[in-house]
Image (cartoon, rainbow, N blue to C red):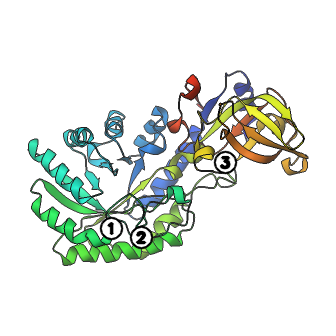
Amino acid sequence: MFDQDTLTRFKALETPFYFYDLGLLNQTLQACKTAADKYGFHVHYAMKANFNPRVLAAIQSFGFGADCVSGNEVSAAIANGFKNQQVVFAGVGKSDKEINIALDADIFSFNVESVQELHVINQLAKAKNKIARVAIRINPNVDAHTHHFITTGLDENKFGINSWQLNDVAEALRACSNIQFIGIHFHIGSQITDLTVYKSLCIRINEIQTWFEDHGFQVKVLNTGGGLGVDYQNPDSNPIADFEGYFKVFKEFLNVKPGQEVHFELGRAMVAQSASLISRVLYVKYGQKKNFLILDSGMTELIRPMLYQAYMKIENVSRQAQDSGLKAQDSGFKYDVVGPICESTDCFQKDVSLPESFRGDLFAVRTAGAYGEVMASRYNLRDAVGSVYSE
């Protein structure tokens, strides 16, 4: 819920735009840092979730590292103040150009996802007379119990190296003279809310760590990835993810040897609740079977509901401000909330119970700070979506 001063400010602005609550962002980052520091854990922020400059400035100010999945993200992280030695570079399809960017930046580590990639990095590093530090991304075949579109740690996923390929990995590591093996890397999916999944991951990490040690490799870094989910249904009741519970699982079940570092790559949990997409109702269409609210934002501004069938809470903030005692489910009005794009899939949510809504009403799509602005497009030659900040 937004206070009256914020709503008054919204009314004077052209929509659509992303509104960032920087106060909540800083509270979230502090909660993450406090929980991680309790156990001496290292956190790299997943740049793909949101690379808004004000957001990156806040994250960098807390001393977090950066998890990148493209050469441009590597460059952006360093340009925005993240330390080179806190940058990791993942991705199943790193190009030669991107690898060279990361080599020139002397980043902390490449998270390598295939045996062939190991040889390519070694070749490019040799040409520059450099040693590339690598962690091997391994598929632990752990079910993240999340949407199948955002599951990444099963054998059938394209990411990482499967366990039956480990002997080939060991052979390649011994053959690559310009590679320094530093550790093992995992990532099983996104929007994970069942923390027992991470216990299963820890068990697999412990087994795989033992395999590497038995084959003569010293594992200095255990990179567990990320994936911690947030509460899309109740953003006001649960604005900050359970960082304490998340890190506690790894403290209890991960076998950490003396001198080892434990790294994490969190994105959504750090930024999702800090932003809402603010729109206006352009038209209200009443039909015999369906009522439609047509907003001035759509899949060009926020594609998650259309791409992943993701649930995101939708609020008529104009009517909630005026009729705060009226529960939406008691209003008797149901709408399909849709956008203006010339695609039938351009629908945020169907059969949403809302207060009776009118042209010009302000709407908020909540928990939009992750994979929102960063995935916006110019399809239909739309204007680029803007950003507004709380301070």
SS class, disc 2 = loop
Name the one closer to the observer, 387 or 356: 356
Q: Position of residue 264 (x, y in %)?
A: 39, 58
Name the one closer to the observer, 217 or 248: 217
Disc count in the image? 3
Query: What's the amino acid at mark 2?
Result: Asn
Residue at image mark 3: 312
Q: Is residue 315 above or below residue 200?
A: above
Q: In this view, does 176 lie to the left or right of 73?
A: left
Asked if disc 2 and disc 1 are in contact, CB closer than 8 Å, the reply is yes
Q: What residue is at 80 percent from the left and 28 percent from the top?
A: 283
Q: Can residue 193 be seen in this view?
A: yes
Q: Position of residue 158 (x, y in %)?
A: 39, 58
Q: Is residue 80 left or right of residue 335?
A: left
Looking at the image, is mark 3 or mark 1 earlier in the sequence?
Answer: 1
Q: How crowded is mark 1: few (under 14 residues within 10 Å), some or many (20 or more)?
A: many
Residue 46 circle label: none
Looking at the image, is mark 2 or mark 1 earlier in the sequence?
Answer: 2
* Gap in angstroms between the C-alphas marked 3 and 2: 29 Å
SS class, disc 1 = loop
Q: Quadrant of residue 278?
A: top right
Residue 162 circle label: 1
Q: In this view, does 37 lie to the left or right of 321?
A: left
* Gap in angstroms between the C-alphas marked 2 and 1: 8 Å
Q: What residue is at 19 percent from the left and 61 percent from the top?
A: 181
Residue at image mark 2: 141
* Gap in angstroms between the C-alphas marked 3 and 1: 34 Å
Q: Is residue 127 above or below residue 226?
A: above
Mark 3 against mark 1, which lies toward the viewer?
1
Looking at the image, is mark 3 or mark 2 earlier in the sequence?
Answer: 2
